[in-house]
Image (cartoon, grey):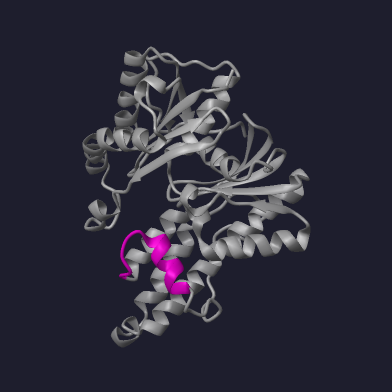
Amino acid sequence: MSEGLLVLGIETSCDDSCVAVVDGHFRIRSNVVSSQVEVHRAFGGIVPEVASRRHLEVLPAILHTALKEAGVTLRDIGLVAVTQGPGLLGSLLMGMCLAKALAFALEKPLVAVNHLEGHLFAVRLDNPSANPPFVALIVSGGHTELFAVRDWGNYVLLGRTRDDAAGEAYDKVARLLGLGYPGGPVIDRLSREGDGKRFFFRSGLEDEDTLDFSFSGLKTAVARFFSQLSPEEKRDERLLRDLAASFQESVVRSLVKKAFLAVERTACPALVVGGGVAANRRLREVMEEEGKKRGIRVFFPSRALCTDNAAMIAACGLFHFLRGRRDSLAIDPLPQLSLGSG
C-alpha cells in the first residue's frame, strides 16, 4: 500500500515554517525549514501574532522549494500530513489551512498529527532500529515530558514539567544574563568553555520520588545569584561562562536522572530523546555516558531533526495512514493537544 506513496508534511506549531516530502518507506526526499529566529530576536522571545503572519508569508515559497528538492509536483503527492497541535493557535491555523486546501484541491487524504508524537518519529527516521518498547523524553521550549512507549501509537504519560519547560528555562536565563535569543544554543556554546562545577544549582523536584520536572525555581535561583553580583562581576566573561555552564549542568542532571528513573520503573531496554533541547551537546554526552553504564541503548535524532521539522510530521502521518487513519477537512487546530494517557 505504501509502494510509490509520497507524503507531504506541513509543520507550523510555533515559529518555524516547515514543509517536507517523505516516501512510503519513511525516507526523506526533502525537508525545508524557514526559521523565524531573526524575526523574534528583537523581542527576546516568540510573539505569536508575528509568528502566524510570517507563516502566511513564507509557506508558499517553502512548499515550492520542498517539491523542487524532492523532484516531484503536487500531482505526485498521495497524502497530506499536518500538525494539529499542541502549539500556538495562529501558527497551527496557517499550516492547517494550507494542508486542507491542498488535500481538497488534490482530492487526497489528510492526516492530522500530534506534534509530540512527531518528535518520536524524528528518531525513527534516523534510527530504524529504535523500536518499542522504550522510554521517550520529549524536551523542548514548550515541553518536557516522559512517556512509556510500548508500541508505536501506544503512549503512556509518566511525568511532565509542573511549570517551565527546559527549553523555556534556557531562554529565560539567557535573557537574564544578557546572552541573547534563543537561549539554548548560546548557553550550550558558552558552556563549552565554562566550568559547570563552579556554582551549584538544584532543579525543583530533582531529588523527589517523582517523574515530574520543575525548572522555574532553578531560573529564580540563577536570577537571585546574578542580582547579587557586582557590576564588574556581571561583565566578567569567565564568570558568565561558568554561570551558564553551571545552570546547564543542573538542567542536564535533572533530565538524565528522571529519564533513567523512568527506564528503571518501566523496565524498558532503551531510551529515546527528542525535541529541540535534544540537540544540546552536554545532554547528549551525559545521556549516552549514563546509558553505557547501565547497558541501556540511547537514541537521539540527528540535530537537524531535533528541532521542529515537517519530515517527522510526514512520517508520523504515514504511519497512521497505513493503519487506516483518514481525517475530515473539518478538523480544527488543538493548541492544548496532549499525547498518551497518564
Q: Is residue 186 magenta?
A: yes
Which of the image's four quarters has the C terminus?
top right
- Can you name the residue that lies furthest to the front here? 71
Quarter of the image containing the N terminus?
Answer: top right
* Vertical comparison of 141 with 14: above or below: below
**175, 74: nearer the viewer:** 74
Eyeballing the image, is 281 above or below 125?
below
Q: Residue at x 30, y 87 (%)?
A: 232
Residue 51 x/y as whole percent: 26, 42
Report if residue 111 is visible in the image: yes
Give the image location of residue 262, x and y in percent: 69, 49
**Residue at 34 percent of width and 14 percent of height:** 104
> Is 123 placed left or right of 303 in the picture?
right
Marks counted in the figure total 0
Q: Is residue 207 visible?
A: no
Q: Which residues are magenta?
A: 178-191
Q: 52 or 21, which lies in front?
A: 21
Percent x, y of residue 316 = 53, 31
Q: Is residue 44 magenta?
A: no
- Report the magenta stretch's main SS: helix
Q: Is residue 295 above or below residue 191?
A: above
Residue furthest toward the bottom?
232
Q: Is residue 175 left or right of residue 162?
A: left
> Would you identify the image quadrant in which residue 227 lies?
bottom left
Q: Position of residue 300 (x, y in %)?
A: 59, 51
Give the residue at x 59% y 32%.
340
Could you say which is closer to the camera, residue 20 or residue 167?
A: 20
Judging depth in this view, the residue of 109 and 163 nearest the camera is 109
